[in-house]
Image (spheres, coloured by chain):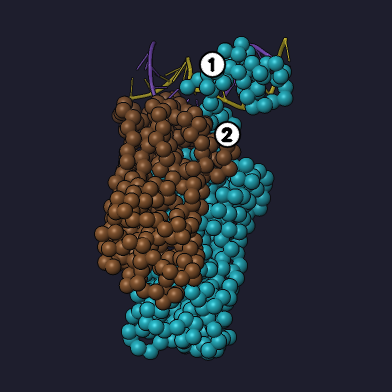
Chain colours: A brown, B cyan, C purple, D yellow
Amino acid sequence: MATLKDVARLAGVAVSTASYALNHSTKVAPQTAKKVFKAAKTLNYQKNGIARDLKRNKTETILLILDNLAGPFYSELVRGVQDTLQSLNYGLIACSSMGGITSTAARFLAERRADGAIILSFNLSDQEIEQAASKDFPIVVLDRLAMTHESIMSVLVDNKSGGYEAAKHLIDLGHRDIAYINGPLDARDNLQRRKGFELAMKESDLEVHPKWMLQGGFTRQGGYLATKMMIMQGKLPTAIFAANDEMAIGAMNALKEAKIDVPEDVSVVGFDDIEMARYTSPLLTTVSQANYDIGSLSAHLIYRSITEEIAKKDYIMPTELIVRDSAKRL
Amino acid sequence: MATLKDVARLAGVAVSTASYALNHSTKVAPQTAKKVFKAAKTLNYQKNGIARDLKRNKTETILLILDNLAGPFYSELVRGVQDTLQSLNYGLIACSSMGGITSTAARFLAERRADGAIILSFNLSDQEIEQAASKDFPIVVLDRLAMTHESIMSVLVDNKSGGYEAAKHLIDLGHRDIAYINGPLDARDNLQRRKGFELAMKESDLEVHPKWMLQGGFTRQGGYLATKMMIMQGKLPTAIFAANDEMAIGAMNALKEAKIDVPEDVSVVGFDDIEMARYTSPLLTTVSQANYDIGSLSAHLIYRSITEEIAKKDYIMPTELIVRDSAKRL
DNA sequence: CTGTTAGCGCATTCAA
DNA sequence: TTGAATGCGCTAACAG
């Protein structure tokens, strides 16, 4: 690998001059610059980014930490981060926190191989995150309880209000018997959504029947099985609220298989507004969380924290009920 | 940020001693080591990974380049890479090549911010890739024509043979009228799969009817529409071979909607063996490409290229027909 | 076992 | 406008 020194030597100039030239500094004479560029080309010179980073003490790239690079994750969110950083001329690298302390994420975090991080991961402890954060290494955590650290900002979705809206919608449509399909019971988003659901029910003096409080683990298969089980047990609710769209789709499949029409016989509402929700039949009524915006906001927050002094602030993003065809008036 | 020097000073030892201690070198006395660790702890010292990389001239991380971090990509493949590198104690970072020359991928490639790369991306030119490759920066390209460069290895799927097997399966089941749903016409994998399909047809002296040569763009929606159109035109084939599972699922949906039973009335075969293929009803017969293995192999290849001298070699991975329930004897 | 020292490749200050 | 020299933070060879 040719280094700057080699280029300088071949061009017959000093290293500094070569550096200036290659960085398009105006203070080097066009003549000289040309010589340098020619030398660089013949040597096939590529600047060593690592050395540059060390010297400049910044990398101009942001780290995105996910539980698992192999998904599933919210692709819209990643897209928001990606687009935004690109427009800001910052790089984005993603890595997984799988493997805990030995994971690439932990390493990159501890060793500061980026200028900041966006964390959408649950297998990293608050402590590890706090350890890494500092004024010149800001962190944005997503879907995680806010932290008090000065350099850690949090943006999360108003899951509770989303759950509330979805339930309210069903209640307003005249439904009284509503089943809820849970995601993993230790998932914060599931719990929050359920809280919203329960609040709406309570406000209307409606009971949540224990046998209609199902488990679906956030997977399509889980929603399918939970619904199937409910069907086999006989008495059905008039509506099902699944804590995410995948489970809602599973539920619809189970219903369809049992010749139970959606929404004629049973209404179904999901949560997330995944792409697929626009392709199911009937089209899925669901709650949308502006994931793209969340990603974009996070990227902006990180960027601003790096480039200017901004006051720490946490954000709660609103949700929106998307009324389609899978829930109808009773 | 405290540096090694600070730690050394506080501990009252030389920088080198501090370095040795923190790297668990055996040649430092337990006493001294303890002092160093204490100093490090009180200063909240974190080693600067960039400085370390520069000095050691290696990063122990591999770069995975994707067209778009926000998917879609083969998650099994990524999982294979991820697991393998983790077991080899190498880090993995992923980045996108979107944005061409200004993309993070291009930057990281040119500036050698990793020890090697696995490229699963089509918006990077052969030239850019060749530019970056070298003996100490090996590259594995996936699903891309092999390149002659000494340090670029290629692993690709035997799409043609997979297409052949799928078609052969349908023919062996007695089907004569078989439709083919294409992916994007400029996608190499689609073309190869089609070639295999056409070969099988030809071998059995069967015609590929032009009106049964459909376009589905590799999306579920595309498969759905193509099939819908075919249904509306009247005469149906007895079998449909979709160039990927997404389209096959779309096709099954269209068929189902039109009350055409799969596989009673029409057989359907897909390609990829995505997870969903195990949840459709009927279960989807398809062609599996061992994506996990491909990822794992790629990671091993990169690793070995870095750690030992290995001869360049290109790999073609076999496919396997997975017979499930969506295709039956005519 | 510990300390001194010399770079890794680059950006940048200071002097010419 | 150019060059010489310094140092980013770390590792490792070498000397003691």
Of residues A290 and A107, the one drawn nearer to the viewer in this rendering: A290
Q: What kind of element bears circle 2?
A: loop
Residue A33 as seen in the image, left or right of residue B196: left
Which mark is on residue B6? 1
Of residues B247 and B16, the one drawn nearer to the viewer in this rendering: B247
Which amino acid, mark 1?
A: Asp
Query: With respect to residue B207, does A134 lie above or below?
Result: above
Query: With respect to residue A59, does B128 lie above or below?
Result: below
Q: Position of residue A327 (x, y in %)?
A: 31, 65
Residue hosting label 2: B57
Which mark is on residue A32? none
Are the numbered discs 1 and 2 placed on the same chain, yes or no? Answer: yes
Q: Position of residue B60 (x, y in %)?
A: 58, 39
Query: With respect to residue B63, does B267 lie above or below?
Result: below
Density class for disc 2 (Cα within 10 Å; few <14, some 14-19, many ≥20) is: few
Which amino acid, mark 2?
A: Asn
